[in-house]
Amino acid sequence: MERQPKTSGRLAAFALFVVTVSALLSARAEDSKSGRAPPSSKPASAPAPSTTTFDLRIVGPDGKPIPNVEVDFLSEPRISPEDIRRGRFVSQASYGATLQPDGEGRISVLRPTDWKRLEICIDAPGYARFWRLWQPYLRSDPIPVELTAKLEAGWSVGGTIVDSRGKPIAGARIFPPSEPAFGRVDALKRFFDRAPRSDAEGRWRFDCVPLWRDPVIVEVDHPQFLGRG
């Protein structure tokens, strides 16, 4: 049997390598012409998270926007003036931030990536008190991207605080029926700060009673007078 020279096998392998390289270069050239990116062995990096907002729209029972109200945002982390994208920053209190919607009844704030809690409280005269709470870390519903707060019609209640001799008591705090959220420190602070007080003649008024609540029982807090009415 005649022996084949060893160089023939090497030449065949070299020819196969040339063909493979030529085919690969040709495929890359076609991708370049068509605008396609060549395949990469590196995994694609995840896109950077985009900045989102929380959008609140406040309307009345008729669906029309309510612009001239104050909205308290109790959140963790807190909202700062730099976060406002729509509406107006009114003030910062120990319990949270107070904002005001624009002429269309809208508020838009930057949404923190680590938003652990959001609580919205609205006391608008002539409407029932509005309250919503989200605490995702306690397995509540997730904080939504947008919310329409439809305020229900309300009515007003008031009276006069006097001592045993009939003399008016000024500066007494009046606590209307509370929401079920008052287990947290900041919510309790808001409850105390927002409570109506009696004036120099002992008169007080609360304008956010739901239509369905009758009678209304309130708590009165004053060093000289404690009780219910």
Image (spheres, helix red, strand yellow):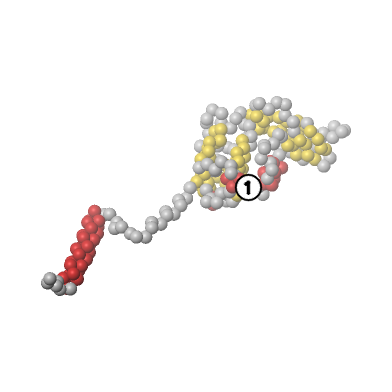
- In this rendering, does residue 132 appear at all? yes
> Quick one: SS at disc 1?
loop
Work out whether 180 lies above or below 34: above
Q: What residue type is labelled 1?
A: Gly
Of residues 84 and 51, the one nearer the viewer is 51
Residue 110 image position (x, y, % from top left): 52, 48
User: With respect to residue 193, does 150 lie above or below?
Assistant: above
Residue 39 in the image: x percent, y percent? 31, 57
User: Can you say whether 184 is above or below 29 in the image?
Assistant: above
Q: Which residue is drawn at 59% across and 51% down?
A: 77
Q: Which residue is situated farthest in the left direction here?
A: 2
* Residue drawn where x is 67% and y is 37% of the image: 179
- Against 42, is 205 above or below? above
Quick one: which residue is furthest to the front in this view? 1
Displayed quadrant of residue 158: top right
Image position, residue 82 (x, y; %): 54, 52
Using residue 220 as the reference point, say whether residue 102 is left or right of it: left
Q: How many labels does the image show?
A: 1
Q: In this view, does 228 lie to the left or right of 70?
A: right
Disc 1 crowd rating (10 Å Cα; few below 14, some 14-19, many 20+) is many
9 or 205: nearer the viewer: 9
Q: Of 87 and 137, which appears nearest the observer?
A: 137
**Quadrant including the C terminus:** top right
Q: In which quarter of the image is residue 163?
A: top right
Left or right relative to 24: residue 174: right
Residue for badge 1: 96
Where residue 190 sits: x, y (%)? 68, 43
